[in-house]
Image (cartoon, grey):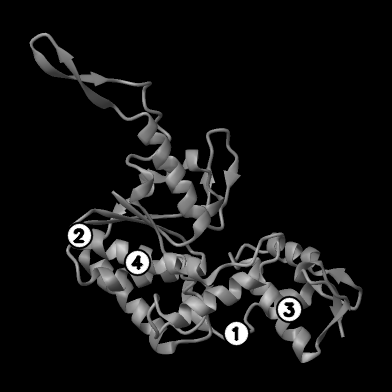
Amino acid sequence: MIEVLFAESEAASVKAAKSMAAKYAVCSKTIQTVSGPASVWVSHKKKPQNYLEGNAEEVVCLGFMLDIGDIKQAADSSYRKELIHSMYEQEQWGKEYVDKELLDVYAGELARLKQYLADQQQIRIWYGDAPYSRCGFYHVCSLLRNYTNEVYVVKLPEYIVREDGVIISYKNWGEVASEELASFLPYEKKLSKEEVRMNACHWSGLAEDNSPLRAMVSGELIGVPIDFYDFLIWKRLTHAPVKEARLIGDLLGSSRISIGDWWYASRIEHYIKKGVIRVVEDSKNKYARVICLQ
């Protein structure tokens, strides 16, 4: 089963889940006997139930961030590569500069998915209501119209109730631990051809609208203006100086809309250049700057 996800963290979790299962797989080896070679099955420990069948190579990550920017251009276009790079450049949590060539990985992942589809492999898509995830799901459905593969989906539920009665909600699949993923398989369903076409039409509509951003509003993914999330910044930024990292951390912790820190950083940088936000103490590391309203 080929697993399709739309962000690095969630793809890593699924890879971990499938890798653990592979370690416990039943294997065979051939030994030499007096009467000739014989195949002997060697059974390891019983495979745990909380891991996914298969291996890590079956995981495809399409981290194209399709909830932002021009989506009339192809997902693997140079435009999208530059856009993703500009977003990654905003991230300053102690990370090094991101090599543009690393972003070619996503184009390679898309090509790998198309090859799996051509080989008639079964596909399982893990998606949720995070804008980047829903966009990715609709985009993949637009590709699936040209294939006859069996397609399964696992949609992240709004919340789950544990056996001890505790209610847990998740923003995206990246928040689900690898050992917990298999517990979501009861939510799996097979996607009909009609549903594939319907979701592909959603993608066509979004591409035709081609707003700067796409966001979930009242349960529907729609195009929105580029300043759609800015009100969250204005709710927390005042004339009192604050470290940019602290502000962004508060923004991430106070909302569950699955927008990355890089987006807030890019909008803060935009308003610094416009003179709306003032840098009180500058730093080469943007997140270490102290800022306030002008």
Labels 4 and 3: the sequence-earlier one: 4
Mark number displayed over residue 149: 2
Element at label 2? loop
* Closer to the eye: label 4 or 2: 4
Q: Pointer 4: what residue? A: 110
Position above or below: 58 against 246: above
Q: Kindly report the distance in space between the C-alpha atoms of the residues bearing marks 1 and 3.
A: 13 Å
The dot on residue 226 is 1
Q: Earlier in the sequence, mark 1 or mark 4?
A: 4
Q: In which quarter of the image is residue 242?
A: bottom right
Q: Can residue 74 be seen in this view?
A: yes
Image side of residue 84 versus residue 265, left or right: left
Outermost top residue: 34
Residue at the spot of label 3? 268
Please give the name of the residue rendered at 31% of the width and 69% of the height, measured from the top-left corner: 141
Per the model, the C-alpha gap separating discs 1 and 2 is: 37 Å
Q: Which amino acid does label 4 sit on?
A: Leu
Badge 4: residue crowd in 10 Å (few <14, some 14–19, many ≥20): many
Point 66% across, 72% down: residue: 90
CA distance separating discs 4 and 2: 16 Å
Q: Quadrant of the C terminus?
A: bottom right
| Amino acid type indicated by mark 3 | Ile
